[in-house]
Image (spheres, rainbow, N blue to C red):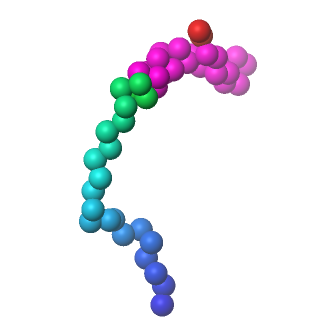
Amino acid sequence: MEKNYSKKSKITKKMKPDAAVVSFLLNYSKALKIVKIEGQFFEIIVN
């Protein structure tokens, strides 16, 4: 008998991240630049 591991949990948890974590992620995403040069992608942190 196979076991189905993809069933959804009936318990839902609301995630409440710290303001510092949200601020860090937003600032990181604003500073991240992706540049394509000759078919290759480069990720650059502009800080």
Asked if residue 30 is positioned above or below residue 8 in the image, the reply reads above
Query: In the image, residue 29 lies at what x, y percent?
Result: 49, 21
| Left or right, 9 with reference to 36 | left
Q: Tally the marks.
A: 0
Asked if residue 22 is positioned above or below residue 7 in the image, the reply reads above
| Left or right, 8 with reference to 2 | left
Query: In the image, residue 28 lies at what x, y percent?
Result: 51, 20
Report the quarter where the C terminus lies: top right
Residue sitting at x 36%, y 69% = 7
Q: Quadrant of residue 12?
A: bottom left
Q: Quadrant of residue 40?
A: top right
Residue sitting at x 48%, y 84% = 2
| Left or right, 14 with reference to 27 | left
Q: Nearer the viewer, residue 40 or 4?
A: 4
Range shown magenta: 23-45
Q: Nearer the viewer, residue 37 or 7?
A: 7
Residue sitting at x 48%, y 90% = 1
Residue sitting at x 36%, y 36% = 17
